[in-house]
Image (cartoon, grey):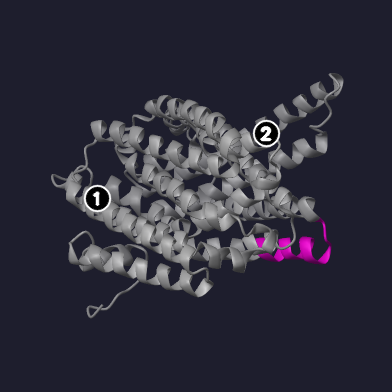
Amino acid sequence: MVPVYTHTLSTAEYGLLDTILRFVTMCMGVAFLGIRQAYVRLYFDMRSTGSNRTLTSTVVLANLAVAVLILLLLLAASVAGRNLGAGDLTVRRSVALALWIAFEATYMIGLSHLQVRMRSRQFVIVQCGRLLLLIAINVTLLRVFHLGLNGALIGNLAVAVLSGLVTAAVLLGSAGLHPSTRYFKELVTFGLPYIPAVVFSYVIGNADRLTLIHFGAVASLGLLALAAKIGELALMVFSGPVDYVWSPYALSVHAQPDGPKKIGAMYTRFVAMYVLMALGASLAAPIGVALLAKADYAFAARLVPIVAMAWFFNVLTTLSDIGILISKKTWIKPFSTGLVALIAVGLQLLLTPRFGVIGAAAGTALTYLSLFLVVRTISQRFYPMVTRPRDFLVIAGSASVALLVGLNLMVAYSSLWMSLAVSVFGVLGCGLLFVRTGVIDIADVRSVASRLGIRLSASQ
């Protein structure tokens, strides 16, 4: 979607769109009581197909009930705001926001349903179908009707409603209408700690954008948003399938005698792959910006390495909190994310006024590094996975050298061809070193590929 938006919206409009989408995601997590996360965890405690169906039915119906409550609260806020002279939250906007949040949350539950059942092909097909629908609607509204920012918002709302309706129909059609009060209580008990954690996570992930808006640097929002998309792109392409297999795999082997060692080995392999993705995105940033956006966005290429580092620590945090998930100690999440949220605000207030958008990006990278260290330390106390420090030294050392050499070559020889060369050779060089030093094993690659639905021959 990035080229569709960056070729039709200004840097300020694209930055505002990205900020709004992030806000909707946060609202979705707060409003629905962590139900999705609870569903993934509790699914593996069910002992029969009937219990799984009852749990799925309970989750979907609870989601729809919460959606009605959200709508009523937003309508009440709209009326109260009008009486107090603050009419920005109109009835129409209240209904639109409630529908968007509710149906987007329902769609995400559908993805979780495929995730816990290990339906990789259906997962990919559903995601691709939704992406094509999103592209078609947005191209029509932005390119044909020239609706600008409003068109982008309407397109995202329409896709959320359509995908949510289809998801609800499919899930209730297969699970039936069999809600359970007991399961609902378990879902809420497990998921409630996620509410403050989601709010704090929103602060962590958006403090840079909110600080830029506060200091009047709205035009820089689009640059930061594009850099984030490029920095995220490679990581998200890989992290989507990883998220699909990581939690189910860890939850299925954690009780085995060698479970900590198996989980640690898989963790190390995923870290190595994430490093390669972040390295490639950082070195290929000028190519990405040239392909995805107008010349107005050129400065975003300088931000990509910083943002890629931030997202690397972000996805590493997602992997590292597996101990909290296994032990069901979700009550710790508000404390860890709350502490890091304070760090995020402090870093942004310190760096952004002095260094502008570069300071904002650097503050976010340092924030996610802090979050990773906090979560990793806590998670290891609850369920210590077994890893080899030597592997992480190899990963960090080789990637740092490749990045520094590559960036210096790109400064000396400013060319997209040089960017392509250093990104290809840098990633290949690090990848070969990981294999030679045993950080990545070919057998592990085949195992992960098979879990992702990819078949590799023995010769590979």
Residue for badge 1: 392
Query: Secondary structure of the magenta portion, mostly?
Result: helix
Image quadrant holding the C terminus, namely bottom left
Question: Which residue occupies the foreground of this view, 66 or 155?
Answer: 155
Relative placement, left or right, of 376 versus 352 is left
Q: Position of residue 77 (x, y in %)?
A: 75, 25
Residue for badge 2: 215
Q: Position of residue 72 (x, y in %)?
A: 72, 29
Relative placement, left or right, of 185 versus 455 is right
Residue in the image at 41% along x and 46% along y: 52
Residue in the image at 69% along x and 59% along y: 296
Question: Which residue occupies the foreground of this view, 185 or 416?
Answer: 416
Question: Which residue occupies the foreground of this view, 229 or 386?
Answer: 229
Magenta part of the chain: 134-147
Secondary-structure class at tag 1: helix
The amino acid sitting under disc 1 is: Phe
The alpha-carbon separation of the residues under discs 2 and 1 comes to 39 Å
